[in-house]
Image (tube, rainbow, N blue to C red):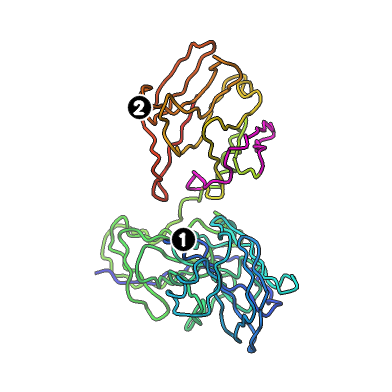
Amino acid sequence: MNKPFLFTALLAVSLVRPLPADTVVVFNEIMYHPATNEPTLEWVELYNQMAVDVDISDWSVTGGIEYTFPSNTIVRGGDYLLLALSPATMTAVTGSTNVFGPFTGRLSNNGDQLRLRNNSGRVMDEVNYGVEGDWAVAPDGSGVSLAKRDRGLASGSAANWAASAQVGGTPRAQNFAQETGFVAPPGLVSYWQFNETTGTAALDQAGQNHGTLGSGVTHASGAGIGGALSFNGTTNAYVNVGPGSGNNFSVSDGLSIEAVLSPGWSGTNSAVIFRKAARRPGAYRDTVLTNQPIAYWRLNDSTTTIVDSTAGAHNGTATAGVLRNQPSLIPTDPANSAVRATGTDRITVPGFEKIGSRGYTVEFWVKPHALPTACCQNLVGDGEASGDYFMMNYILGPNQGLVGAIRPHFGPANSPVSLDGATAMSTMWSPPGTPLLRPTTP
């Protein structure tokens, strides 16, 4: 039986300590991307740093969400207040009656700005959380919250925020228990306590290098300073400890790694204890633009002008019936809106077929709202003149082949060359994380 051990890693990189908060009520915890029931379990926690009660009547939270606190709203000295998307749900979860809401808007999973304003409109506290750089990534869907390390310090610095130590966060309770038996040395960047009791997560208490346990690793009782892990000696017995700080484990002043280990493995071969995670992919938009497309329409537009994100500026125009700001079709880019069009509504880009005079590939994401009941539905096409089918993409309808399949349709003067897709699209929404059909037309 393998013996458990506790593993910590020390990287010799200095951290900048945030400044003390200059207000009395501050943001303290944010649950912006719950693992389940996201429409009911989003919430924001405020904390009163003073020992006396504070009246926040007519104060407001603005930015990604909007809410104004009613008259006689009191935050008791040293106490917490919850602002929830579904107050009834959070009241049931916490057993507390000090839950306010619902707020309007949603906490973005891709990062957002929150401001706490007093009844005169003055900004009392502000946080611009994110999922890149120094911001912890575990709160983005793993079930933990974004929790302030030190509730007495300012909210603006990413260094003062971390993933909560438990799934579901710590609503109306202290974010992190006072450490005993361990004093963080200067320059500590990552620290894994392994005190999760279930699941495959290994949360970094000091940074963003949240790890994942291999299938050959199980949770075990701790060694007095946290949890522990037991390794069974197989090739899957390791901890993937994250992608490093800013996707990089390189350091200029040296690297120190410290582990508390109780060996119990008697194998003759070497064993991997931890390894670096694969590099996180960059933002979807940046990945696309890095490949220097001729044109790239994000479809995040608030007006009928459909902007080309490249320097080519091949901007289009949407008809009035095109519904904008629809949910994203790209699982890895939830902030990227989609558009929806029916009937004769469309987006027109002048000179579309001449944009790539030497040939080009068109790639788009599509999710049918309704399959055609007649001939077909046009997705992409030049549409410059009747009978001009230089490039058009249809969703097939009855009597056209496989209903829901895509037909790339080429050729001028009604001399098309077609190749029907082998996969039929469905109008049923896919489960979260399921890839959507992504047609590519050469």
- Point out residue 72 in the picture as x, y percentages from the top left corner: 63, 82
Asked whether 224 falls inside the magenta stretch, the response is no
> Could you tell which of marks 2 and 1 lies nearer the N-terminus?
1
38 above or below 49? above
Question: At 62% across and 80% down in the image, what residue appears?
Answer: 73
- Point out residue 176 in the picture as x, y percentages from the top left corner: 50, 77
Residue 200, quarter of picture = bottom left
- Numbered disc total: 2
How packed is label 1: few (under 14 Cα within 10 Å), some, or many (20 or more)? some
Q: What segment is highlighted magenta in the picture?
A: 303-332
103 above or below 75? above
Left or right placement of residue 309 versus residue 120 in this view:
left
Type of amino acid under label 2: Leu
- Element type at marker 1? helix
Numbered mark located on residue 348 in the image:
none
The residue that disc 2 covers is 402
Asked whether 331 falls inside the magenta stretch, the response is yes
Question: At 42% across and 75% down in the image, what residue appears?
Answer: 92
- Point out residue 393 in the picture as x, y percentages from the top left corner: 49, 25
Type of amino acid under label 1: Glu
Question: At 40% across and 40% down in the image, what residue appears?
Answer: 427
Left or right placement of residue 390 versus residue 120 in this view:
left
Numbered mark located on residue 38 in the image:
1
Instruction: Give the camera-side residue of 4 and 267.
Output: 4
Principal secondary structure, stretch drawn in magenta: loop
- Element type at marker 2? loop
Left or right placement of residue 409 versus residue 112 in this view:
left
Contact, CB < 8 Å: mark 2 with mark 1? no
Quarter placement of the N terminus: bottom left
Give the distance between the C-alpha atoms of the residues marked 2 and 1, in whole angstroms: 36 Å
